[in-house]
Image (spheres, coloured by chain):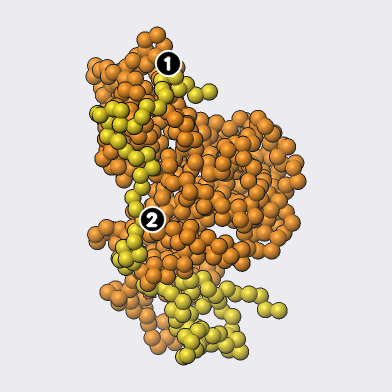
Amino acid sequence: MINLSCVREKRPRGSRDSVVEIDFDRHDPLMTSEEAQYEASRCLGTVSCEACDVCRLLCPDLAITRDSLTGEIHIDLDYCKGCGICAAVCPKGAITMVLEE
Amino acid sequence: MAGRQVTQMAVEGRTHKPVVDRDLCQSCSVCLKECPAELFPELRSDEDTTRGYVYSNTDLASRGVFPPCFGACPLGQQVRDYVKLLEVGKVKEALLVIRQDNPLPGVCGYVCHHPCEQACIRGSWDDPVSIRELKRYAAQYEMDHRSVIVEVLIQRKEPARGKKVVIVGAGPAGLACGFELVMRGYGVTVMDALAQPGGMLVGGIPSFRLPRYVVDHDVGIIRSLGVEFLSSVRIGRDVSLPEVMRDGAEAAVLATGAWTDLTLDVPGEGAKGCLKCLDFLGVVNTGQNVELSGRVFVVGGGNAAIDTARSALRLAAEQVIVVYRRSREEMPANHEEVEAAIEEGVEVQYLLAPKRILTENGRVTGLELVRMELGDFDETGRRRPVPIAGSEYIEEADVIIPALGQRPGVSFVDVKAISEHDTITRNPSGMVPGYEGLFAAGDAVSGPSTVVEAMGSGKAVAQQVMDYLEGMPRR
Ligand SMILES: Cc1cc2nc3c(=O)[nH]c(=O)nc-3n(C[C@H](O)[C@H](O)[C@H](O)COP(=O)(O)OP(=O)(O)OC[C@H]3O[C@@H](n4cnc5c(N)ncnc54)[C@H](O)[C@@H]3O)c2cc1C
Ligand code: SF4
Ligand code: SF4
Ligand code: SF4
Ligand code: SF4
């Protein structure tokens, strides 16, 4: 097993002046929500959120509409040809292609 | 550029052509992903269309992956998406994006070596986005709202398939593999030799870098999803490998990491006061009361060396000196860890190698060092350190801890399945040669790597296990 014969019983902290005391488990504090939002705003990417419209704008058959009251995205399956573009572009991965019954 | 010429060529029947405004493009890649030739790669091989011509003249490999943060993350985290959700204060949504690809968000928020930040485009302007710290911030939300996350993950779980997989090793690779498989509907048992799950996260990396409640939380979520953990069971001692595989499981995964310390191979290494790095960190990590005395020398330049030095300093050693045989640039340890160590009072000396350990009555009393200079490039692309003849000198030392790296040191699989680098080998389907249904992942296969690389390996192997169990065509 481990050869720790040089390791002695623990002495009370601060018994040796020459040593800088470091709290064993010191951690930097977490970001505040303001700091996190500022840091995130430095990312050069575009905003991707729910109802981002990307799928609607790219649908070749204009089958995707947005409800003007709720802002929700609707897909009109009477017009959809099942190309899968909307599912591929959705930055949130919110659209999946499921097999037709 | 061949590609550019083609875009200027008018295609018969086309009335409009797409033109990119470089000032407006934010490299979101939406257009790229939507191009039919990206969606259906077969279309690229068309011989007589513009599309076929463009693709045969484009170097797809050098085009890189956008955004680069995503391309650099071994887990394929959708960094831009979660960062942009955090910008608008949608912490829960950001976390769910992180959760899609990362089963240990808290752990990664603390100790990931963040290649994403090295790749971040913002870095060429001022500083890269602090992607890892933002992940740490988002993971805190998860710890404060545990039940919300568990509920969403349980919804994402696929129905049970009635098949069982045993994983040996509860480090990042085993945990990621277990998470993936349980989410796909398999029964999963993870065995580990240590008293609690986490692997190097609890047995190697000290708690001042990774608080234990973070590991416990991430592991706890995996447990809540149905993964069963068996602790303090060592394969090869408490139970044999064939027994594990016979135990009602359809497949098994070895994710046993790299736990055998490399030795210095200099005279005097067996003396009292010369410790093994992982033994030392193990004692520190299990909270046993230890105090080092006098001058401590740590030999090495990786994360383990820096963690050992910082732990030794916290245990109130008088002086802690890290000696590394190359220069600062070649040092494999994370830059910020080295900075933090130096700030706390660790001394780091470069271009030095130990030659002999001086002993008296079987105890360490000193260390003979030789100065090094950098010579030609070696096969790793780094300059090889060469000793300078006659530059030897002696330092007084009370404790010496070599932290030169580890190797897997696996003794319970057939030697035919062990490579010359002492790692476990795999055939292209991910299986260990000579064992039906036995897979391997993580540091046990790659040699010492990093938390996210081991996790990425665990995820990839989960897919291979699934291919095997579902009888899908194997590559
Ligand atoms: C001191 C130190 C600091 C590090 N710091 C960082 C860092 O800051 N960032 C980073 O990305 N990486 C870091 N690493 C590397 C990282 O920890 C490893 O690459 C990673 O943990 C490997 O994961 P793994 O799952 O393959 O193996 P491990 O984490 O090693 O887990 C393997 C598990 O298998 C168990 N096991 C082994 N043999 C048996 C057996 N026979 N029977 C049962 N169980 C067994 C072990 O007990 C262990 O729990 C550090 C490594 C060390 C040593
Ligand atoms: S990468 Fe994104 S921003 Fe740039 S042109 Fe394409 S869709 Fe527009
Ligand atoms: S072929 Fe591709 S690049 Fe050309 S217009 Fe269509 S989607 Fe855009
Ligand atoms: S897991 Fe690591 S590499 Fe991937 S995005 Fe997070 S910090 Fe970056
Ligand atoms: S700015 Fe950085 S973090 Fe944001 S998308 Fe680009 S590479 Fe990723």
Residue at 53% of width from left, 60% of height from top?
Answer: B146
Residue B169 rendering spot, x and y as whole percentages: 59, 41
- Mark 1 — residue? B271
Q: Label 1's element?
A: loop
Q: Is mark 1 within 8 Å of ligand 1?
A: no
Judging from the image, what is the letter of the chain drawn in orange? B
Residue B397 rendering spot, x and y as whole percentages: 32, 20
Q: Is B343 in front, or is B25?
A: B343
Callout 1: chain: B
Residue B182 rendering spot, x and y as whole percentages: 64, 56
- Quick check: marks 2 and 1 in contact, CB under 8 Å? no
Q: Is mark 2 within 8 Å of ligand 4?
A: yes
Q: Is residue A9 positioned above or below B117 on the image?
A: above
Residue at 27% of width from left, 58% of height from top?
Answer: B127
User: Residue B376 got which mark?
Assistant: none
User: Residue B132 got which mark?
Assistant: 2
The answer to whether residue B4 is left or right of residue B77 is: left
Residue B189 rendering spot, x and y as whole percentages: 66, 47
Residue A77 visible (yes or no): yes
Residue at 31% of width from left, 23% of height from top?
Answer: B295
Callout 2: chain: B
Q: Is residue B48 positioned above or below A1 on the image?
A: below
- Kind of residue at badge 1: Ala
Judging from the image, what is the letter of the chain drawn in yellow? A
Q: Is residue B419 positioned above or below B148 on the image?
A: above
- Kind of residue at badge 2: Arg
Q: Is B472 in front, or is B142?
A: B142
